[in-house]
């Protein structure tokens, strides 16, 4: 459920309507419940290649798939990393590979039923992200992969002008024309970025250049993984479909109030100038946040929660964070 504050009407009705119609289409396929669909796919033993397996999304997807009975092969540049070892301990087969090395991709995809693909712009730029996405699609097609699930970004198909949104849209288009069976999940901003801001929040500050009444949407990586696994479990319902996903939404002012409630201390939004924000975070993220402040994500959160009420709320995620002894001490004062 939504956490607090008045309902914020979506600003792009066509996008929300399209999302609602998509949910109707997905709901109309078969008569099984979400729990029954999950149970039907459990124990399949099908081998899924998870790219970026030591990252936030890839790690969550690998764990979800293992929990549903899939065999998982995790692709990573560094199979000796602690995160890789942790997945291996859970039963994943970890292999070394690089998007820039076609031989390693071909080897990793040998014998797999499906591929979960994640691409990243922050290391090499958007042009290279597109090259990497196409390389993954090409390798999957050559290997005869049965189902390719790509994680993109909400709004990727809306010509936002955000470079790393547009690059993912190009990969989506390339995938759609590949001849593969495909699905696309499009998440909004990650709740999983909040632990990296722990000290900021504990200091009573929520730094953001946006308007306090600007609506924002978030999703937890475990919920991205849930939708990815649903796509593999139900390939008929999910084939050739893209779905924008989010678990919660509220204004920036409401988020600051939620932080204050969770931490039991005053927390205020600290608005900084766009110039200062760009100096600290770079041009790409500034373009994205300026888009947040004008258009922003418009996922049909209410529609998703009606079908998937278990999705993680912002409050649940924040209360589950490790705030440490400083937070505990503050609550006793």
Image (cartoon, helix red, strand yellow):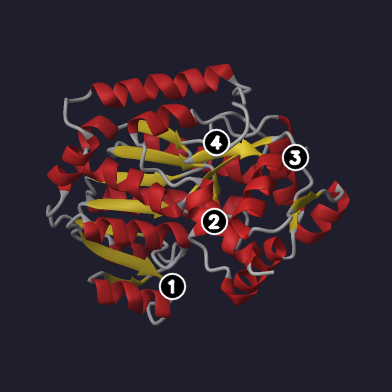
Disc 1/disc 3 C-alpha distance (Å): 33 Å
Q: Nearer the viewer, residue 131 or 203?
A: 203
Tell me the quarter of the picture where residue 84 sits: bottom left
Q: Which residue does the numbered mark 2 point to in the structure image? A: 318
Q: Are marks 4 and 3 in contact (CB under 8 Å)?
A: no
Tell me the quarter of the picture where residue 65 sits: bottom left
Q: Is residue 204 left or right of residue 164?
A: right
Q: Which residue does the numbered mark 1 point to in the structure image? A: 77
Q: Are marks 4 and 1 in contact (CB under 8 Å)?
A: no
- Name which of mark 2 and mark 3 comes first in the sequence: 3
Q: Which residue does the numbered mark 3 point to in the structure image? A: 290
In this rendering, the count of numbered labels is: 4
- Name which of mark 4 and mark 3 comes first in the sequence: 4
Q: Which residue does the numbered mark 4 point to in the structure image? A: 156
Q: Is residue 136 visible?
A: no
Q: Residue placed at 86% from the left, 55% from the top?
A: 276
- Name which of mark 1 and mark 3 comes first in the sequence: 1
- Mark 1 falls on what kind of element? loop
């Amino acid at each position: 459920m939504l956490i607090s504050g008045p309902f914020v009407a979506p600003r792009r009705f066509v996008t929300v309507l399209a999302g609602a119609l998509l949910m109707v289409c997905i709901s109309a396929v078969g008569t099984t419940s979400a729990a029954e669909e999950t149970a039907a796919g459990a124990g399949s033993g099908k081998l899924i290649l998870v790219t970026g397996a030591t990252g936030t999304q890839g790690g969550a997807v690998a764990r979800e798939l293992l929990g549903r009975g899939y065999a998982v092969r995790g692709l990573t540049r560094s199979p000796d990393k602690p995160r890789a070892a942790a997945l291996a301990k859970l039963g994943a087969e970890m292999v070394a590979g690089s998007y820039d090395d076609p031989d390693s991709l071909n080897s990793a995809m040998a014998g797999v039923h499906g591929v979960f693909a994640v691409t990243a712009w922050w290391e090499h730029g958007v042009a290279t992200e597109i090259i990497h996405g196409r390389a993954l699609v090409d390798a999957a097609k050559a290997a005869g992969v049965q189902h390719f699930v790509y994680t993109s970004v909400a709004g990727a198909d809306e010509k936002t002008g955000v470079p790393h949104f547009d690059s993912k849209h190009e990969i989506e288009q390339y995938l759609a024309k590949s001849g593969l069976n495909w699905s696309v999940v499009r998440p909004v901003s990650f709740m999983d970025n909040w632990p990296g801001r722990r000290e900021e929040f504990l200091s009573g500050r929520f730094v953001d250049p946006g308007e306090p009444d600007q609506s924002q949407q978030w999703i937890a990586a475990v919920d991205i993984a849930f939708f990815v696994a649903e796509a593999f479990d139900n390939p008929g319902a999910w084939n050739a479909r893209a779905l924008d996903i989010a678990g919660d939404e509220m204004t920036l002012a409401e988020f600051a109030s939620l932080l204050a409630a969770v931490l039991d201390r005053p927390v205020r939004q600290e608005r900084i100038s766009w110039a200062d924000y760009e100096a600290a975070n770079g041009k790409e993220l500034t373009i994205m946040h300026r888009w947040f402040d004008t258009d922003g994500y418009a996922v049909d959160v209410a529609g998703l929660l009606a079908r998937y009420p278990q999705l993680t709320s912002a409050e649940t995620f924040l209360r589950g964070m490790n705030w440490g002894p400083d937070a505990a001490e503050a609550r006793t004062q």
